[in-house]
Structures are given as structure tokens and as C-alpha cells.
Amino acid sequence: MKIRYNGFAFILAFLMTSTLYAGEGMWLPQLLKALNEGDMQTMGMKMTAEDIYSVNKGSLKDAIVHFNGGCTSEIISAQGLLLTNHHCGYSQIQSHSSLEKNYLKDGFWAKDLKGELKNPGLSATLIARIDDVTDQVLKGVTDGMTPKERQSAIDINLEAVKQSTKKEAYQDITIRPFFKGNQYFLFVTITYTDVRLVGTPPESIGKFGSDTDNWVWPRHTGDFALFRIYAGKDNLPADYSEDNQPYNPKHFLPISLDGIEEGDFSMVFGFPGRTDEYLPSYAVEQIVDVLNPAKIEVRDQALKIVGTAMRSDEGTRLKYASKFARIANYWKKWIGEKQGLESTDAVGKKKRFETQFNDRAKKSTDFRAASTLLPEFEKLYKANESYALSRDYYNEIARRNIELMTVASYHERLIRTFKDNGEPGYNNFKGRLSNFLQGFYKNYDASIDQDVFAKLMELYVNKIPIDALKTPVKEHMKKMGTRDYKAFAKAIYGASMLTDKNKIDELYAMEPHLAVEALSKDPLIQLNSDMSAAYSEHVTPSLNANQDKINELQRKYMKAIIDLFPKRKFFPDANGTLRVTYGKVNGYQPRDAVNYLPVTYLSGVAEKYVPGDYEFDVPKKLMDLYESKDYGQYADNGKMPVCFIGSNHTTGGNSGSPAIDAHGNLIGLNFDRVWEGTMSDISYDSSICRNIMVDARYILFIVDKFAGADHLIKEMKLVHPKKK
Ligand code: ARG
Ligand code: GLU
């Protein structure tokens, strides 16, 4: 009985993997023809690989733009109109906002080209072509080399490849390692620096649901904003000038008015930032059991204190909303990641794969040595655990969640700059620092930060696993004459000049050597510098040495995996380079007896609507449009779609990526993932990993019906691919 059941389960699992796992992978656009085209077409795609990536003709890739190096965006008109997420353009929108014209609150729509707003420092990067340069980069590199020798040989080769690659003067070249350094690709890129803000919905639409709904399905957020790329008269990159003209792209994405339904093919094309799909089970175990819980615990404490303060005072809420959102974003992600890794038995899956790996390695002639890799990983991860945990506690506590510790570390650097580079260096750094502090103090409340300090210092001393790291904190407490963390916080915040902008202004007006002398006596700067010295002495060297060894093992492990499983297709971990991921519009089952449908509608916004609430209020006009069902050509059977989910494998950096249909038309805008599936950065599971997109029709509806910016609709190309 038992055996038969297992056999059946095995066959079932096998059948399921071959169909359901279709969503996994962040593929290289230049290799789609060789690896994915057939698969994509089987799933419903009507294009060829050449339609997606081509160096000879305009292709989809010519519409995909790296937005300021972090997010993705796409061109949706012949005049360089650029679509990305509201949260990607947030700081630009904020920089144009003031109390009188509050674009975050009210939205903004340029009436014509002249009204579009410039954004110094914002860049938009296109990919001209991608070349495999592995052979040149690894020329002369041998297995017998030490990691150091290997790296210096590679560095020399990289320089040679860069020098010998043909490119235009307006182009740039970057070379990046893939598959843990087993392969190298060269990217020829073009970066535009005149990128202007065209339009944005009010935050109440663009950030609807805020932190409560962040990483959550069902979702109702219109997370989009519009920009435009400008070029010189020759259509090439040019610094901002009134004479610049809208960029004329090689390709832009038409927008489908026909929408989506469950089972439709979808692909997401963009710049995913970082994944770790090939970690050994020991590393995943450590993340689940040790590292994520530690990071979550620190942020739990910090968010509790800040959240309570925000709830009790409106001014505090405004000051801390954006900082709270930043800290809460990854806190929530890590919790979902840990749970998802556990619920899908990611460690068990890894372990079973590792058993297979070892079996194959032992049987092979070329890779017998690879069977020692996993035991080596295990030893190394164990040996590294206290360093990795210390790193996470230290970074979360001393670098991220106590605000004044960050300010202290900047001033420590200011002191060092004075010592190393004298007054010119000091003045230069002071100038930049005082710009930063201007904004910092506007949104700073020392009493909240002092409470966070007290709580997190206690956590630090109780939890950090290396005793030498606790010593500086204990010594400073002794100096302040207390063993109580609250009293310690009060004493140190009371004595430090960093809590007070006026004191900093006075200090900055002093002669540099006097200012440096005063700074050097500040108790918080002293504490920070003693803590960071202890970290540099007791953690950094071992952590770096272990990480070098882990990287070396990971490179060998990756190569052995690829060679020992010749029938499988592998994709390289995300590294901020252009990727294609494809899947289907697809709901999921988050927990027992609960089924999630793949599409949300405006009726759901009305359900969540809480007038006056900072997360769930919406403009009256939106509710009026809902009441009158005035959706124009954007409705789907009389209803207004808002968001949808699919099995596309995405990560941070994919924000703002286009969701594209079988024919190459825009159907949505990626902006998030579902909470249960955030572990897809480490282990993708098709049962619960879904990306979240705004429906393109909701974007058009907001631009047209809500904002009345129909001149923008006119420059787009709206199509009906399903009604041919
Ligand atoms: N979770 C999304 C992404 O990482 C959206 C983040 C912005 N929104 C927010 N409410 N914090 O990164
Ligand atoms: N919001 C994320 C971003 O800013 C995308 C969500 C994810 O991590 O998948 O890139």
C-alpha cells in the first residue's frame, strides 16, 4: 500500500513539475532562441525569440529601459513616453512637491511637452547589444590558480576586452559575471540623462493600501507614473536643454485594450536585482532558522516603537511615513520569505537535489571531486554562522534602525576625512553632509529615536553572538554610570550634539580643527566608532575570508550542477541585468480552503475605501467614476480591472517592468509579489509564487477618465490583439 502510494505521488510530482514549473527562471534575452522559444510558444506565445531580442532590427528589448539603475521602465510611444511605478518615481515626484503644489497628494499631469518637469540626476539606460565574452575573460585562467591569481588574471582580461570592443562614443560598456563567474557577458548600453516627469496619479491611487497592502494579494494599487526621455537633435543622449526633443525609440510597446484572463501567456521583461537560487541547503537553513529571524526581530522592535508614535500623533506620522515604509518593506518580505521557505519545504527540496547531485558526481569521471563540495559548504556555513549573524545584527542595529547611529558614522567619516585630506576634503564632505542633514532633521524626532536606541542596544548586548562586540557598549554604559538601557539612552542622547540641528549648525560654522575636536568628544560618535572598530577587528576579516571561500565553492558547485544535469535548463541568478521571465495569468491557494482569483476590480477599491484614512482613502472623483461606471473603452464586461497576478518569476528591480502578452503588447505593469511567495528569490515554487501587476487598462483609465490627460492617450498605440 505504502509503496504504491509513494510511487503514485512520485509520478504525480513529476507530472506537476513539468507543467507547473513553467514560471520559474529569469532568462537571458540573447539566449531565448536556444533555450526558451519552444517552451514559450507552447505556453501560448505568438512571437519569435528574434521579436524579443535582436541586434539587427527593432525588437521588444529596445523599449525596455533601466530606470535610474534600480527599477525598470518601458517606452510606450514614438515620443519616448516612459512608464514605470509610482514607487520608482517617488523621490522625483517628491522633489517637485511643496505645500502649495503637492504632487504626491494631488497628482500631476503636464498639459504639454513644455509643462514636463526635469529631474537632474535621473538616468534612463537602454541596451544596444549583449555579447558572450566568456572565452576572452577566462583566457589563461586555470583550475590550479588560487582565487587571488584567478581574479587578477580575469581583471587583466576584462580590461583588454573593454579596450578592444567596438562601440560608439555615446555608448558605454559593462561586463558582468554570470553563473557565479562561470560565464561573462558584455553589455553595450546607451544612457539618457534628460528624463522628465510627465504625470502621476495622487498617492492615494499610486500607493493605495500603503504598508498594510504591501506584498499582499488581493491588491488594488495604481502603482504607476509617466516620464519622458529627451534626446539631442540627433536622437542621442544629451544633457538637459530646452532644445532637446522627445526621444524617438527603435521600438515602443503598443497597449492591449483586450485585457487578460486566467491562463493567458504573460512575460515580464526587465532588470531583476538579486536572487540566490543556487544556495546549498545549509545556507537556506541558516536563512530560515537564524538570519531572517534575527533581522525580523530587530525591525519588529523598531517598527513597534515608531508605529506607536505615528499612531498617536499626526505630525509624527507625516515625518515617519516614508522611513516606516522602507523599514517595513523588507521586514514584511523576510517574514513571508521564511514562511514560504518552510511551507514549501525548500530545505528538503534542496537536500533531495543534493543527494542526486552527489550520486551523479560519484558516478562521473570528470566530476568525482564535486562530491566533496557539499560537505565543504556545510563546514563553512557552520563556521561562518556567528559572523554572519553578527553582521546582520550589527547592520540592522548600528547601521539601519537607530537613525542617529547613521548620523554618527557620517561624522566619524568627517573626522577621518579631515585627518586624511585636510581642510579641502573636510569642507567638501561637510557640504554634502549638510545637504543630507537638512532633510534628515526635518523628519527626525530624537525622543522616538532614543527609545529605539534603548531597545535595540539591549537586544544587541543580549543577542549578538560574539562577546567582543558587546564590550564597547558595556564600557560606554559604565562610563555613563548606568546598567539600565533606558537611562543609558537618555544620558547619551542628552549629551550628544547630534540630536540638535542648531548645535550642528554652530559646529559647522566653527573652524575645521575646532569642529573636529568637538566632534571627537561626542559620546555617540565615540560609541559608534568603538562599536565599528570592534566589528572591523572581530568580524570583518573572518567574514570576508569565509565569503571568499564560499564564492569559490559556489562557482565550482554551479559548474558541476550544469555539467551533471545536462538535460536541465539553468538560468543565472539575477544581477541587475536584462532578463525575460514568462508564465501565465494565474490565481493561487494561499492556505487551506482559500482560493485567490487572479484579477481585482475597482469594486474592491470601493470595498477597502476608508474616507480620511492614510492608507485607504481615495479621491472622490475616483469613487464618482465608480458609481457612474464611467469606464469608457477600458472596461471589461462592464467592470474596471485594477490588478492581476501571474506565475512570472520576478524580484526587486523588476518594479516598473512591462507585463507583455503573447503578441508583444503591454498588458500590465509589474510592481510587487505576493507575500506567500516572496521566497522565490531563494526557491521558486509554482504553487504560491506570483508577481503582481497593475492592469494596463486601469492605467489608461486613470490617465484618461480620472486625470483628463487624453493628449497622452492619443500618443499611445492602443490595440485589440484578441479581436482580430
Ligand atoms: N513591495 C514592493 C517592492 O519592493 C513595493 C514597495 C513600495 N511600497 C511600500 N508600501 N513600501 O519593493
Ligand atoms: N517592489 C519591488 C521593486 O521595487 C518589486 C517587488 C519584488 O521584489 O518582486 O522592485
Image: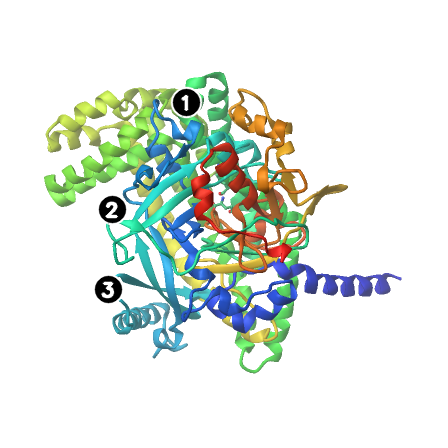
- From what the image shows, is residue 144 above or below residue 68? below
Instruction: Quickly name the residue at label 3.
Output: 169
Q: Residues within 10 Å of mark 1 (few under 14, many from 20)?
A: some
Q: Residue at x 33, y 23 (%)?
A: 493
Tell whether label 2 touches label 3 (CB within 8 Å): no
Front one among 420 and 655: 655
Q: Which mark is residue 240?
A: 2
Q: Position of residue 499 (x, y in %)?
A: 30, 23
Instruction: Quickly name the residue at label 1.
Output: 448
Q: Earlier in the sequence, mark 2 or mark 1?
A: 2
Whether residue 154 is visible here, answered yes or no, is yes
The amino acid at mark 3 is Ala
Q: Residue furthest right?
A: 1
Tell whether label 1 touches label 2 (CB within 8 Å): no
Front one among 611 and 555: 611
- From what the image shows, is residue 379 above or below residue 621? below
Nearer to us of marks 3 and 1 is: 3
Q: Earlier in the sequence, mark 3 or mark 2?
A: 3
Q: How far is mark 3 from mark 2, CA to CA?
A: 18 Å
Q: Position of residue 281 (x, y in %)?
A: 58, 58
Q: Residue at x 62, y 66 (%)?
A: 41
Q: Residue at x 30, y 29 (%)?
A: 439
Q: Residues within 10 Å of mark 2 (few under 14, many from 20)?
A: some
Q: Residues within 10 Å of mark 3 (few under 14, many from 20)?
A: few
The amino acid at mark 1 is Ile
